[in-house]
């Protein structure tokens, strides 16, 4: 099956899922907590993931699906065609703000990212990429990222980074925040990655993300020259949780060398 055929199918189910979410949440929303009181999930997260699984399995039963809500089969390797899906990225925004939440999907063939999607459900904005062919924001091609200095950059970073923590040297982060043009925190990893690949942010960092938070985004990143790694500068582990940074290529190394420094 051609990549183009899978791409067309992926877009069609993303738009359909978006419509279902926009229609459902005003009258049918049940909120629960997961690992802690701030880790939310809703019936719509689960129903959206199930919707994707059913559609994909009908399309081609050999495709495997790794989703945040664990509604699919257990995926232990990236052999074959694997969809890594976050049905709603930014569930807190979804529940609290009714906006700024994304559908995030990365499609891998034998471990190589081939198709990436980040869909802003309320704005109906799609960021996507086809490996080797380019990236787009709706109908407009995304340009290669232009060089930027630390002093000119706007960085997506959470407020918890400036308090003492067990992950990174927070005093270096304070230095960084004083140096850059500005900081932002949007509450959806996929949205922040979409902003980096489209030049609206110059970097985004997180202390702990899962494969579905970044799968779609890292495939788009490659097409525009953004660099995505963990905080040790290594490849993100797509079968586990890891630290994460995505940045304009001109500042990625400097950020890790001088400002975002893990304890080990
Ligand atoms: P989610 O909304 O799909 O859970 C801000 O919370 C960002 O971090 C969101 O993209 C969120 O994805 C992600 N995230 C990753 N792990 C999380 C966790 N344990 N609790 C809350 N958010 C988490
Ligand atoms: Ca979640
Ligand atoms: Ca997520
Ligand atoms: Ca989610």
Image (spheres, rainbow, N blue to C red):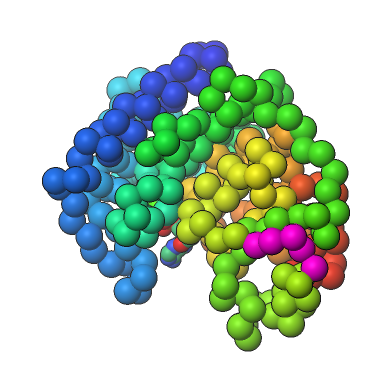
Q: Position of residue 118 (x, y in %)?
A: 50, 38
Residue 181 image position (x, y, % from top left):
74, 60
Of residues 146 and 220, the one nearer the viewer is: 146
> Is 193 left, or right, of 56 in this rendering?
right
**In this rendering, does residue 129 appear at all?**
yes
Magenta part of the chain: 179-183
Furthest toward the front, the residue is: 181
Residue 80 magenta-highlighted: no
Q: In terms of image quadrants, where is residue 152?
A: bottom right
Vertical arrangement, residue 4 with respect to residue 28, above or below: above
Please tell me how many numbered marks the rendered image carries. 0
Residue drawn at 22 percent across, 60 percent down: 31
Res 219 → quadrant: top right
User: Horizontally, is 72 left or right of 64 in the view?
Assistant: left
Can residue 181 be found in the magenta stretch? yes
Describe residue 100's horizontal placement relative to residue 42 as left or right: right
Q: Is residue 79 visible?
A: no
Q: Is residue 262 above or below residue 87?
A: below
Whole-percent x and y of residue 36? 35, 74
Which residue shows up at 30% across the image and 22% down it? Answer: 58
Residue at (46% x, 17% y) in the render: 8
Locate the C terminus by quadrant.
bottom right
* 237 left or right, relative to 21: right
Image vertical order of residue 63 relative to residue 226, above or below: above
Q: Nearer the viewer, residue 53 or 136?
A: 136
Residue 242 image position (x, y, % from top left)? 59, 62
The residue located at (37%, 27%) in the rendering is 15
Which residue occupies the extreme bottom position in the image?
Answer: 164
């Amino acid at each position: 099956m051609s990549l183009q055929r899978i791409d067309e199918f992926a877009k069609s189910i993303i738009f359909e899922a978006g419509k279902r979410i926009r229609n459902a949440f005003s009258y049918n929303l049940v909120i629960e907590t997961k690992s802690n009181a701030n880790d939310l999930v809703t019936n719509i997260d689960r129903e959206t993931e199930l919707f994707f699984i059913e559609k994909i399995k009908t399309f081609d039963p050999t495709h495997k699906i790794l989703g945040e809500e664990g509604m699919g089969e257990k995926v232990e390797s990236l052999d074959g065609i694997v969809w890594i899906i976050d049905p709603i990225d930014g569930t807190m925004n979804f529940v609290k703000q009714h906006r700024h939440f994304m559908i995030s999907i990365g499609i891998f063939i034998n471990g190589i990212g081939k198709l990436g999607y980040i869909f802003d459900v309320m704005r109906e904005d799609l960021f996507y990429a086809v490996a080797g062919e380019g990236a787009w924001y709706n109908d407009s091609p995304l340009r290669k990222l232009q060089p930027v200095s630390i002093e000119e950059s706007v960085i997506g970073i959470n407020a918890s980074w400036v308090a003492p923590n067990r992950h990174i040297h927070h005093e270096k982060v304070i230095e960084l925040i004083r140096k850059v043009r500005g900081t932002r925190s949007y509450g959806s990893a996929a949205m922040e990655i979409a902003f980096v690949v489209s030049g609206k942010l110059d970097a985004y960092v997180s202390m702990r993300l899962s494969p579905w938070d970044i799968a779609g985004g890292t495939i788009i990143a490659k097409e525009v020259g953004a660099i995505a790694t963990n905080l040790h500068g290594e490849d993100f582990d797509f079968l586990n949780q890891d630290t994460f940074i995505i940045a304009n290529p001109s500042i990625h190394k400097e950020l890790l060398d001088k400002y975002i420094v893990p304890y080990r």
